[in-house]
Amino acid sequence: MINMIAFIQSAADTSSAMAQYSDKWDASLQAGQSGFIMQALASNDLIFIVLCVTLIIWFVLLFFIIRTDRKVSKLEKSLTQQENNQEDET
């Protein structure tokens, strides 16, 4: 009797889990009708999307670091020129 109750509970848990993910399965079925890129991404569990987003984040960070370095270099040059001009005046 206890085994029967455990079996019924596990069946109910499975059906509720399937109901929660049913819309995701429906979306994956529709991927067959979409373009080549979406089919490739859907077939590999979307790991490439994660990779692309990560690469975009790294490139943006690299861009900001390089831009900030250039701005700091320009500021350093202007400060040294100002110091040189002040020394020449005195």
Image (cartoon, rainbow, N blue to C red):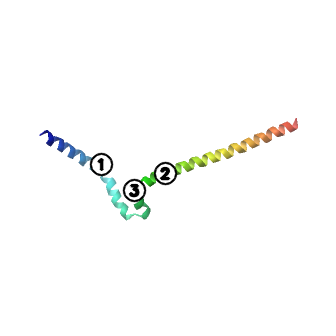
Q: CA distance from mark 2 to mark 3?
A: 15 Å
Picture quarter containing residue 5? top left
Q: Quadrant of residue 12?
A: top left
Residue 75 in the image, given as x and y percentages of width and height:
72, 42
Residue under label 2? 53
Q: Position of residue 45 (x, y in %)?
A: 39, 54
According to the image, label 1 marks what residue?
20
Q: Amino acid at mark 2?
A: Val
User: Secondary structure under badge 3?
Assistant: loop
Task: Please tell me which of labels 2 and 1 falls first in the chain.
Answer: 1
Nearest to viewer (mark 2 / mark 1):
2
Q: Identify the residue at horizontal 39%, vertical 57% (top origin).
A: 42
At x 63%, y 47%, the residue is 66
Q: Tell me how far mark 3 sits from mark 1, CA to CA.
A: 21 Å
Which of pointers 3 and 1 lies earlier in the amino acid sequence? 1
Looking at the image, residue 51 sits to the left or right of residue 76; the answer is left
Q: Which mark is residue 44?
A: 3
Q: What residue appears at the point 87 percent right and 38 percent down from the top-left corner?
A: 88
Element at label 1:
helix
